[in-house]
Image (cartoon, rainbow, N blue to C red):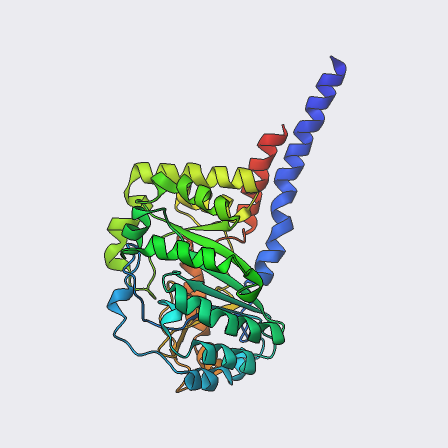
Amino acid sequence: MKKNIIYRLLRKIYHILQKILTPFKYIKKDLDADKITYFPKIIQFPITYKCNFDCVMCGMKNLIHKDDFSSNDIRQILQDKAFSKIEGVGLNGGEPFLKNDLIECVDVLIECLPKLSYLNIISNGYFTDKIITILPEIKSRCKVHNVFLDLTLSLDAVGELQDFHRGKKNSFVNLVNTVEKLIQSPCDYYDKIAFNCTITRYNIFNICEVENFADKYGIHVDYDVAAPNIRIDNESRIDDFYVFNDPLAKQMAIEFFYKLFRTTNNKKYFALYLFLKEKKRYSKCPCRSNEWITITPDSNISFCASHSKLLGSAKEKSAYKLIKENKKYLKCIRKNCSSCSTYISDLNYKGSYLLYKENMKERF
């Protein structure tokens, strides 16, 4: 009896101390992460406006008439000192395999970014023949220069629901064909492959089919929530796709991400669970400090991939100067990004504290 009382007392003291001390563990990390740099480490690089899909959560069809930059334009932009410390590039679009000079563009990235060690290409997987023809060329170039090639294929659903979600007939069939060709000789095509699934009010009810399909091929699935995004001009479609506009879909998504968090212990999924539950961000963002920057296909740069205005053309003016001149604007973005779910994986100190409290429930 006496031992039980002492144990309960010690446990109570432990909880009190943890509540007091745990948040301070993360505050310095948050302050360090918020220091603005003029030399980003990652470029989010939508390389073309062209796309053969009309996804329910995307407005890219409004932009496909716009011209893309050439490989020479990219060379001119990347020679600026602002990009001298770039370590990784995310190539997306539109659909990057619609860009006829994609190989030349990759050559320029390798040539102009001496610290480049990571390249991620995001594709809808529709153009099987083109992908299996071009990807080995890109892979061989990356291998020579010790650049890790990560391929991500968009998979939101299985069968006809994928076709609906992506707004293109045979999108699922072609994706399957692409996957089956790629996995026959993975070393020739990529260093890593994954699926990315974007959650909307339409596909959340059948999300287990995505898991089952991915397991069949032994490919990991990474999940995100479709959200407002200035760059892809989807504001007019928000009422249709957003899970927050469908109470049942929202609840399903909350439960889905909580289950994912419990089964994977992945902080990103805990952050998405919190975001869906409270519509509040508990995560740091690399865009807040300019650690990540976006270059659009018309040569403009922006701080944030989803909510920043265009700072100006990096082809017409030094990117370094554009970043410096817009430092006050970046501070303004930082004050108003609490309801954004972009790049939500790295918890801030409040999110880390909530994670600690959640894990303590399981311990006691």
Residue 290: in sight, yes or no? no
Front residue of 12/261: it is 261
Quarter occupied by the C terminus: top right
Horizontal side of residue 196 vs 14, given as left or right: left
266 over 307 or under it: above or below: above
Could you tell me if residue 27 is visible in this image?
yes
In the rendered view, would you say 6 is above or below 151?
above
Q: Residue at x 55, y 66 (%)?
A: 188
- Looking at the image, residue 10 sits to the left or right of residue 114; the answer is right
How many marks are shown on the rendered structure? 0
* Residue at 67 percent of width and 37 percent of height: 17
Q: Position of residue 146 (x, y in %)?
A: 63, 72
Residue 86, percent from left and from top: 56, 74
Q: Tell me the quarter of the image containing the N terminus.
A: top right
| Image quadrant assignment for residue 59 | bottom left
Q: Residue at the right extreme?
A: 3
